[in-house]
Amino acid sequence: MEWNESLATGFPQIDQHHRTLFKAVSAMAAAAATDDGAAEYLRLLGFLDRYCRDHFAFEEGCMERHRCPAAAANKQQHQGLLQMLTEHRRLNAAHGYDPHDATILVHAMQHWLRNHIGRVDRELRHCVSAKVRVPENGVSS
Ligand SMILES: [Fe+2]
């Protein structure tokens, strides 16, 4: 599963982050489907946790600056995802790697990325068009 134009927010840096997230989750799916993929899966899980925290902080700042109406929902869904990642890291630390848990997380992440980016992050595109809108008489103030 990859990023595509239907998920574009109009903010190139955020779109680039989203591409990286899709790539990381695809790599996790590949690792989880491999018999000896545990180490790679756990490495990617750690990467994803750090990357999401940085990306979410960046994106939330962007929404706040643009007074995006989706800002509160965005923050709330980010918290939900971070909790899910934390819980899976805790399970791995407590009980060791479990390919079944790994597959569940990969599917949940894929679902979350599509829904969240498609429905919440994409509200940002209205902020971009508001920023560059030119009046109908063609004279910008
Ligand atoms: Fe977001």
Image (cartoon, helix red, strand yellow):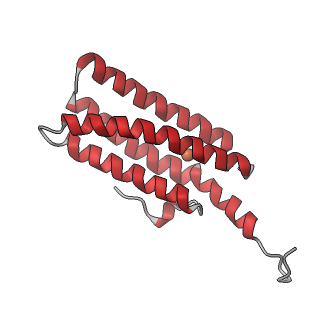
Residue visible at 38% across and 46% down in the picture? 110
Q: Position of residue 87 (x, y in %)?
A: 40, 24
The residue lying furthest to the left in this view is 35
**Depth order, front residue of 37/136:** 37
Q: Is residue 114 above or below residue 4?
A: above
Q: Quadrant of the C terminus?
A: bottom right
76 left or right of 17 in image: right
Residue at image location 43% in from the left, 63% down from the top: 4
Q: Is residue 102 left or right of residue 109?
A: left
Query: Looking at the picture, how far across and down is residue 39, in whole percent?
Result: 21, 35
Q: Is residue 80 left or right of residue 20?
A: right
Location of residue 72 (image quadrant) = top right
**Which residue shows up at 86% across the image and 81% down it?**
139
Q: Quadrant of the N terminus?
A: bottom left
**Which residue is pictured at 59% across the width and 63% down the height?**
10
Relative vertical location of residue 44 with respect to residue 65 in this rendering, above or below: above
User: Hey, which quadrant is residue 44 in on the image?
Assistant: top left
Up/down of 130 relative to 17, above or below:
below
Q: Taking the image as drawn, is residue 103 in sight?
A: no
Q: Position of residue 25 (x, y in %)?
A: 34, 46
